Amino acid sequence: MACTRPPSAPRSAISNVNETSVFLEWIPPADTGGRKDVSYYIACKKCNSHSGLCEACGGHVRYLPQQTGLKNTSVMMVDLLAHTNYTFEIEAVNGVSDQNPGARQFVSVNVTTNQAAPSPVSSVKKGKITKNSISLSWQEPDRPNGIILEYEIKYFEKDQETSYTIIKSKETTITADGLKPGSAYVFQIRARTAAGYGGFSRRFEFETSPVSVAASRDQSQIPIIVVSVTVGVILLAVVIGFLLSGRRCGYSKAKQDPEEEKMHFHNGHIKLPGVRTYIDPHTYEDPNQAVHEFAKEIEASCITIERVIGAGEFGEVCSGRLKLQGKREFPVAIKTLKVGYTEKQRRDFLGEASIMGQFDHPNIIHLEGVVTKSKPVMIVTEYMENGSLDTFLKKNDGQFTVIQLVGMLRGIASGMKYLSDMGYVHRDLAARNILINSNLVCKVSDFGLSRVLEDDPEAAYTTRGGKIPIRWTAPEAIAFRKFTSASDVWSYGIVMWEVMSYGERPYWEMTNQDVIKAVEEGYRLPSPMDCPAALYQLMLDCWQKDRNSRPKFDEIVSMLDKLIRNPSSLKTLVNASSRVSNLLVEHSPVGSGAYRSVGEWLEAIKMGRYTEIFMENGYSSMDAVAQVTLEDLRRLGVTLVGHQKKIMNSLQEMKVQLVNGMVPL
């Protein structure tokens, strides 16, 4: 027999990074050395980006399925460090490789891991326990993978897992109140960094102190009362249901909500003649059928991924180029589905493409196609150079004319009119979900609300389960989950406010619960600084409590068109003194408890250079400062727009603190 030899190096190695995991794939070597016993070995090196020196990764890295003796041409490394440079060397070996005196033959891949969610909290200690409360403390996770922003504590009565409570804390201690005496409760804790939440800790069980015998005798009556009330409610519901079903049999269509009727037809795939309607992909028995019906399949070889530009719910978002046959190469955005996905994740990921593929409008993000026949699975859309609208506005604070801002708003309203006409309710309209290109054209994006909001930091738990973005959502949608085009109009009003305030956070630092209560009691966001009165009035119209009183999107587009054609109508600004009038709940001094002096306040907002000017002009107390208007600032010589905004916004936030106390409005 001819002598055999070691194999050549593997070929075309590619990597896929998912937080602190790396998936490698490669093609077998061109020369197997005349033997069939080829296997693969992975060498892992951690490299310092400054010195260029590399060292072995160590034993904390796990290889799936294994590091040596690999028979298949792929491997996954997990438990890597976040934000770290790694070099992986993939070597093919066979039965005579050990006899080879020459240099190793390998292919290397350089990767940088992403920021990762923190590891689970490993130990929780109980503190003070009473009959109605349990105090807990814990240690920071072993691998925080970044700065811990907050902890989420989930707890429930033992064997009552479906009814749980969530507490959020920036500290490593909490006290759970309002518990039942002598009852066992289960606690789980997870940490959040900028990369998102880590996994929940294991379950920790603690018990409240028992109540006295006399008290327990009184308490024993409560379950009887609760059961009686529950039975009564059930009976009442049955009677009402029977009556309603009887009326429904009589086809009393006058009572049926037109939005519900419209959605019924759409979900049933009944298209109205001459009208293009949106079809919910979830109504398909096979979700893959919906993807192939509404999205074009693209060959992976047509796509060139250039760089990572962000993180999505299911993987990374990249920029790259697409070259289709017979067409010139052009830039695209590419969403990738991370390795190790479940079938449900794949279905949800492609569900957004099934929705997007039904839309064709200059102010809706355009779907180029999907890659489903090879890995990674991808969604390819047009590339928007300036990214999300909220970030873009913050970076360019005060740089645009009012007409340019109104043009942006007009584009968003036009896209929403199209969606509304199609019968599609967005449910998560916000500046962060609007993309903007180099020509300042705004396009509505992000059509995956049902999945995205589960991990969205802007979302909040509601009484009916699930999550919704409270600050952007209409009161009826929060209270009754009644999402319609009218609730999208409310959200559009918030987007208008975001645009005119250059990406400021709606309701500032008020908590979600305070926002719900304040809005319910009639509070509305004040006009942004230098906002035309006509635009602020349109915002207030969008925030009408009665959803039937809000303007339709076609009316909004028409109104904005009139303002653009008649720019002089935008010159009348909202009166500076009335901008914060609906923030004031009584004439008590504002801010006196927050800052001890005018100087301390100005220093806190990095405007200390104006302390002397304020004092010389009689503004020597926080009570006096609370009455300052924009005209007063100009008179004092505060001429820079950015400084004016900073001071006026700080005053507004101090006034909002009064609302935070939930004094009746």
Image (tube, rainbow, N blue to C red):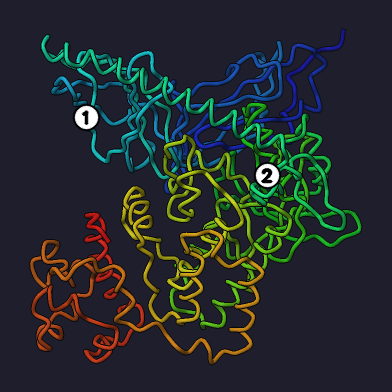
Residue 83 in the image: state x and y as whole percent. 45, 42
For the C terminus, the image quarter is bottom left
Left/right placement of residue 25 relative to residue 636 reads right
| Rendering coords of residue 425 (x, y %) | 63, 52
Q: Check residue 582 in the rendering and tell me which mark sits there, or answer none.
A: none
Report whether residue 454 is seen: yes
Tell me which residue sits at (25%, 54%) in the image.
Answer: 662
Quadrant in which residue 433 is drawn: bottom right
Q: How many marks?
A: 2
> Disc number at residue 177?
1
In the picture, the disc for residue 352 is 2
Residue at the (27%, 63%) spot, across then down = 656
Image height of 447 relative to 572, above or below:
above
Camera sees residue 110: no
Residue 451 in the image: state x and y as whole percent.
57, 39
**Can you tell which quarter of the image residue 252 is in?**
top right
Mark 2 and mark 1 lie on one chain; the one further toward the N terminus is: 1
Picture quadrant of residue 363: bottom right
Q: Nearer the viewer, mark 2 or mark 1?
A: 1
Residue depicted at x 10% and y 86%: 618
The location of residue 215, given as percent across then percent down, is 13, 15
Q: Secondary structure at mark 2?
A: helix
In the image, 623 versus 182, the foreground residue is 182
Horizontally, is 167 left or right of 495 in the view? Answer: left
Q: In the image, what residue type sits under mark 1?
A: Asp
